[in-house]
Every structure is written in structure tokens, then in C-alpha cells.
Image (cartoon, rainbow, N blue to C red):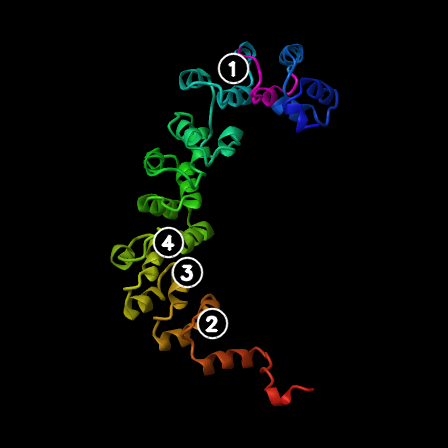
Amino acid sequence: MLQECRRDADVTARLLRDPTSAAEALRHGHLHRADAERCVAERVHPAALAENPSLPADLVERLAADPDASVRLAVSLGAELDERRRMAIDFTVGPLDRGEVEWVRDGLADPEVLRRAATSAHPLLRRAAARSPHLPPDLVHLLARTEDPLVEAHLCVHHPDAPEEVLMRVYARLGGTFSAWMADTHPRFPREGLAARFADHPDGAHRRLAVRDPAATPELIERLSHDPDVRTRRAAVGDPRLPVHRLLKALHVPELASSAGANPALPADEAAAVLDRAGVPARPTSSAVPP
């Protein structure tokens, strides 16, 4: 019925009588004029009603002036509005508000939808458009200039051609697990030249990038294994360019032991010694395996 109500106002009217389905029916259902007027007048789930694409224009105008900020925001996201009318609504968007803009989400592969959303002055429409991996280059660069941290984060997560400067800004701003994931997985995240740019940076997250540079020398890797930032030390200790003498010492430093143990350059006899000390039994030889 919730699917059918999008096309059938009688089904919507039935769903409106059930408190468990009323809000969803108001959000998506085709409405009789009388039901729409009553729900606006009685303020029945007004924020859900404001999202309804079939709501008559005069009722949309009434909700656009609603005293509830969430209702005005919902109206401002309507696909039927032109940009002038959209931006005339008194809405507020917080710096971390993501929002769910259904018509943009459903059109992430539609060039016309993407252009409408990406070129809008509405922050939530731009944030929604930035989630598309199908953005053409001009819209990618347009969104990269919005100075909106959430737009930049969405571009980094979803678009394979996010500009390098955006990747670097998001890496520096978010840090931690997210930035490590982005640095390891994004096809455009830079590698060459990072050692020269960041080995002496005052921020540990940037110094850690130097380890990613294929031109970083063993001497630099060893130096970074003594870095004041523990995550930078761990990154350096896990790098196979680290001199063996430093790697062996790192095995006995509690905060570095795990990274040292995962280093592919760890000599086999040292790895075996670690397992022996931990009481891990050796794998049986084929002759010792019972039939």
C-alpha cells in the first residue's frame, strides 16, 4: 500500500487513518486536495508533508512560512522549486547537517539532476550532489570550491577524480581512521613528493604522509620511527625500508611491537622467536601429520 499510494489518493487516504503509516503516506502519497488541506491546517506530520512532491503549490507556500524550522527546511529541498523561490525560504542548515534529498539521491546518475543540485546555493543540495561518482569534471571543480567540509568529504569518499588539494584538506582536517582509509584507497591520493613536502611538517598527521613516498630513504624512515607522534612512529616501523637494527629494537617497544611484527622485512628467525616467546606452537611437518 505504501508503494501504491504514490499513484492512488484513495490508498493514501486509507493509510492516513493508521498512525503507523501516516507519516510515510504523507511524505510520498498522492493526496486528495481535501486531505492535503486538512493535514496542513491540523499540522499532521508537517515536516513529512512538506516533502510530498504532489502537494499543491498554494499549500507548499503555506508550509514555506511555517513556524517550525524543520518544516521550512523540508520545503526548501523540493524538486519543484526554482532557485529563486528556494532561496527565498527562511531555512537554516548546520555545518554537519547531511539531510536526505530523495530526488537527488535517486538521480545521482542523471546529469540534469546533478547539475541542478550542484549549482544550487542550497548547502544540502550541493552535499547531496557531491555523493555522486558520476559528476562531470566541471561540477567536481565547482563543488571543490564551495569551502564546505561535508561537500569535500563526500567528494573524497564517492568520486574517483576528487582534486588532490581537496584530498589533502580532508586528510588534514579529519585525521585518524578516516584519513588513513582515504590515503590508502583513493586512486588520486598523492604519493610522490610527500617526503620533501611533509617530513618536517609541524603536524604529525602530515609527517606520517612522508612514509607513503616511494622515494623516502631508509634514513628518513628510521628518523620518523622516533617521531613524537605515535601514529607516525608506527607507520615508519611498519615500513620495509626501516633498517633492520631499528626494526628489531621496535619489536620490544610496547606501542610499536604490533607494527614491527607486521613489517614484511622482519627476518624469519626473528618472527619465529616472537611466536616462540608467545607459546605459539610450530606448524607440524607433513610427516608428523597423522593419517
Alpha carbons under labels 3 and 2: distance apart = 16 Å
Give the tally of numbered discs: 4
**Residue 50 within the segment the image draws in magenta:** yes
Alpha carbons under labels 4 and 1: distance apart = 45 Å
Whichever of labels 3 and 1 marks the residue nearer the N terminus, that label is 1
Alpha carbons under labels 1 and 2: distance apart = 61 Å
- Please say if the residues under marks 4 and 1 sit with CB atoms less than 8 Å apart: no
Q: Disc 2 designates what residue? A: 261
Q: Disc 3 designates what residue? A: 230
Dot 1 amino acid type: Ala
Disc 4 secondary structure class: helix
Q: Is residue 34 left or right of residue 52?
A: right
Which of the pair 9/40 is nearer the observer? 9
**Residue 155 within the segment the image draws in magenta:** no
Dot 4 amino acid type: Ala
Residue range in magenta is: 44-57
* Label placed on residue 205: 4
Dot 2 amino acid type: Gly
| Crowd class of label 4 (few under 14; some 14 to 19; many from 20; radius 10 Å) | many
Whichever of labels 3 and 2 marks the residue nearer the N terminus, that label is 3
Disc 3 secondary structure class: helix
Dot 3 amino acid type: Val
| Crowd class of label 2 (few under 14; some 14 to 19; many from 20; radius 10 Å) | some
Locate residue 159: give its quadrant.
Answer: top left
Whichever of labels 4 and 2 marks the residue nearer the N terminus, that label is 4
